[in-house]
Amino acid sequence: MRRGERERGTVRLEEAVAAYREALKEYARERVPLKWAMTQNGLGTALAMLGERESGTARLDEAAAAFREALKEYTRERVPLDWATTQNNLGNALTRLGERESGTARLEEAVAAYREALKEWTHERVPRYWATTQNNLGNALATLGEREGGTARLDEAVAAFRETLKEWTRERVPLDWAATQYNLGIALATLGERESGMARLIEAVSAYREALKEWTRERVPLDSVMTQNNLGTALATLGERESGTARLDEAVAAFREALKERTPERVPLDWAVTEKNLERALRLLDERKAANTKRTTR
């Protein structure tokens, strides 16, 4: 299946799925339960990769079913680390399903699966896998939080991302560190929009700026401009709540940075979004300056 992972098409992955299904005809659960579970897990992994490359949900549903089959023999008591691996894999498939569906049931199941995995994938035992699962958990919680009205899920997402950053340091894995800072920024910004204060938005701005230390325009231009756009949005929201103009000036600068890569020829829809954000920030800035001028001339 390694070649299928590296290729853009689906042919190799389709072949892998067929091979795993053939293997299951020989690796009967009754005869070799652990080999059967291992093959179910491999089948689920191949189906999940197919599901990510296709637009529907059928392959991801099959992947989730295969992982659940594997867990019938890959129990925590018998093979704790394999059980945790499969729980994480199940969580990933359920998260992708949840992202494509409008409800929250799949995401709730994904959160539960990740939390199961973390019972064995501890920081002390397997720090790298622990950090990966914390990040996955944070993403599922953040998506849930965006769909729900409160702040509890978003608070949990923030906590999960901060746990991840204990292991995914800038020195060790700079791009993963930046991605997690970005994810943290999104969760904090969403919290900030729902709360009346400014503390969360200030933290979001800080997280985005941390991400930009590694997600540079030269290194990862699309990630960099995406972060600049989100940074601008957080700064503009802060600027609306403050009386000065400094935050709005910074928002304008961030949107202009984003537009250096988000051109109408390259990414017309993203360009339109950022252009609209810039126009709004400039309008707020003009209104604020006019109000401040009127105040000083009285």
Image (cartoon, rainbow, N blue to C red):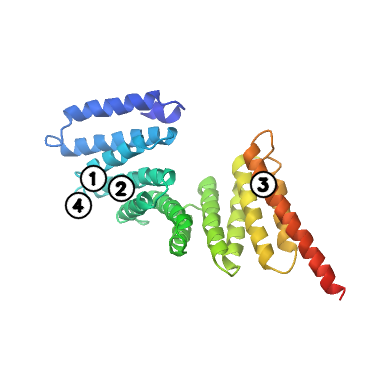
Which labelled disc corresponds to residue 77? Answer: 4
Q: State which mark lies toward you, 3 or 1.
A: 3
Of the numbered discs 3 and 1, the one sitting upstream in the chain is 1
Picture residue at 58% right of the left edge, 57% below the top: 207
Local SS, label 2: helix
Q: Where is residue 169 in the image (x, y as percent from the top left)?
A: 51, 53
Whole-Å distance between the Cαs marked 3 and 1? Answer: 45 Å
Comparing 83 with 148, the one in front is: 148
Nearest-to-viewer mark from 1 and 4: 1
Q: Which mark is residue 87?
A: 2
Q: Which image quadrant is residue 112 in?
A: bottom left
195 sits to left or right of 149:
right
Depth-wise, is mark 2 or mark 4 nearer the camera?
A: 2
Q: How far apart are marks 2 and 1 (CA)?
A: 8 Å
Q: Mark 2 and mark 1 in contact? Answer it, CB < 8 Å.
A: yes
Sequence-wise, the earlier of marks 1 and 4 is 1
Residue 135 seen in this snapshot: yes
Q: What element carries label 3?
A: helix
Circle 3 residue: 274
The front one of 216 and 193 is 193
Q: What element carries label 4?
A: loop
